Image (cartoon, grey):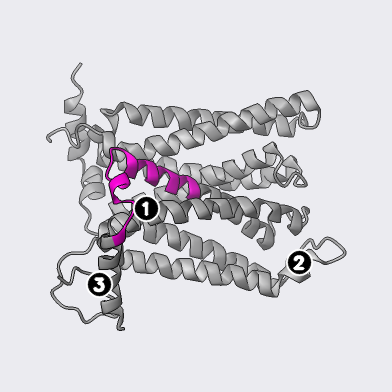
């Protein structure tokens, strides 16, 4: 199935042309990319700090207390969901014809899914006994791998795309 | 030496002596270094940001000294970024030394560094050797934490915008620092 007409349509919308064509730095492509980098620092950064805590760094911080950072982590995630969708509307062909893009989304999906599962265990008070601590540590390790994978995949998007626009 | 001459000298000195150009021009070296730069950013923001937010009052029941144990990992992120960032600078010196966004990035880094030093000079003893675990940070420590968060967001912003302020050939050179190719 040829989905080029869909890409052409998205790229013809006013929103797409604003993302790619706005001469403004703050309210245009550079500003959206910047928000995407800040959101990454917040979401992946706080998730990393939580993973480090599960591995035993700063173990004096009760995990239940660390939950107070989760709303901030989610804010970073949603900032990146919105800025990411805007970037996607700007360059749909570039992203959606590149397998690395789907790899990035898969990593992020699993990173957030694991975060939710870790949080459920913490709320349920399952942290504490040794066998369950081990499970928690395994989850934190997978979480770290997913974030590292998402960041590498995201950065490699700029170097691995085969088509920039449906016309190009 | 005036700033312009210093910039020109730096670019030429780096070009002549850079040990990493051959490495960085191999396939995928640049994107791999960039990925590490982003990983370091996350480690730094995650650990330093958590500590700053604790000073500002999040997770108030946990002693500040306990949360401070994350800071070495923030410093690890910073070290990763000094190394990966140097690889970029030592490969394409003119793209950074004549780039106004890079000048702002260095400015924000200097603010973040000075600010962090101020914390250890002014608040460290009061926060860490207090016999009763201090639950609320002193006001000046909160101000330092707020400045820290803003400065690091400034560093990320100026860093991400580097690519949109790449220098072009100079037409005038009357600014404090060169933001274009002088030759």
Instruction: In the displayed orientation, state which residue is furthest to the top.
Output: A1
* Marked residue chain, label 2: B
Give the extent of the magenta segment: B17-41
Q: Vertical placement of B72 versus A55: above or below?
A: below
> For mark 1, what is the residue?
B87
Q: Nearer the viewer, mark 2 or mark 3?
A: 3
Q: In 3D space, how far apart are the residues under numbered discs 1 and 2 (Cα atoms)?
A: 37 Å
Per the picture, the main secondary structure of the magenta-coloured stretch is helix
Residue indicated by mark 2: B127
Q: Residue A158: image x %, image y %? A: 29, 40
| B154 is within the stretch colored magenta | no
Chain where mark 3 sits = B
Secondary structure category for the residue under label 1: helix
Q: Earlier in the sequence, mark 3 or mark 1?
A: 3
> In the rendered view, does A150 fall on the left or right side of A117?
left
In this view, the residue in front, B122 or A123, is B122
Q: Which one is earlier in the sequence, the residue at label 2 or at label 3?
A: 3
């Amino acid at each position: 199935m040829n989905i080029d007409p869909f890409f052409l349509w998205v790229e013809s919308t006013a929103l797409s042309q604003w993302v790619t064509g706005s001469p403004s730095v703050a309210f245009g492509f550079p500003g959206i990319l910047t928000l995407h980098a800040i959101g990454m620092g917040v979401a992946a950064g706080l998730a990393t700090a939580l993973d480090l805590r599960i591995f035993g760094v700063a173990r004096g911080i009760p995990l239940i207390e660390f939950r107070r950072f989760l709303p901030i982590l989610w804010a970073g995630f949603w900032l990146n969901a919105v800025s990411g969708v805007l970037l996607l509307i700007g360059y749909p062909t570039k992203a959606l014809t590149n397998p690395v893009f789907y790899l990035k989304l898969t990593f992020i999906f699993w990173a957030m899914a694991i975060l939710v599962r870790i949080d459920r265990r913490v709320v349920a008070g399952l942290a504490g006994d040794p066998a369950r601590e081990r499970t928690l540590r395994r989850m934190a390790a997978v979480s770290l791998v997913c974030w590292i994978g998402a960041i590498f995949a995201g950065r490699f998007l700029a170097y691995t795309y085969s088509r920039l626009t449906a016309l190009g | 030496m005036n700033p312009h001459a210093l910039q020109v000298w730096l670019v030429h000195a780096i070009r002549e002596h850079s040990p990493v150009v051959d490495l960085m021009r191999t396939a995928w070296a640049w994107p791999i270094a960039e990925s590490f730069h982003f990983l370091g950013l996350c480690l730094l923001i995650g650990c330093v940001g958590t500590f700053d937010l604790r000073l500002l009052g999040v997770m108030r029941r946990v002693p500040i000294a306990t949360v401070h144990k994350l800071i070495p990992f923030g410093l690890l992120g910073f070290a990763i970024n000094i190394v990966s960032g140097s690889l970029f600078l030592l490969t394409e010196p003119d793209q950074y030394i004549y780039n106004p966004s890079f000048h702002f990035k260095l400015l924000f880094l200097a603010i973040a560094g000075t600010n962090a030093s101020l914390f250890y000079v002014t608040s460290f003893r009061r926060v860490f050797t207090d016999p009763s675990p201090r639950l609320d940070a002193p006001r000046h420590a909160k101000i330092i934490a707020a400045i820290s968060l803003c400065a690091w967001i400034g560093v990320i912003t100026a860093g991400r915008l580097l690519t949109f302020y790449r220098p072009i050939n100079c037409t005038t050179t009357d600014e404090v620092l060169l933001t274009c190719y002088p030759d």
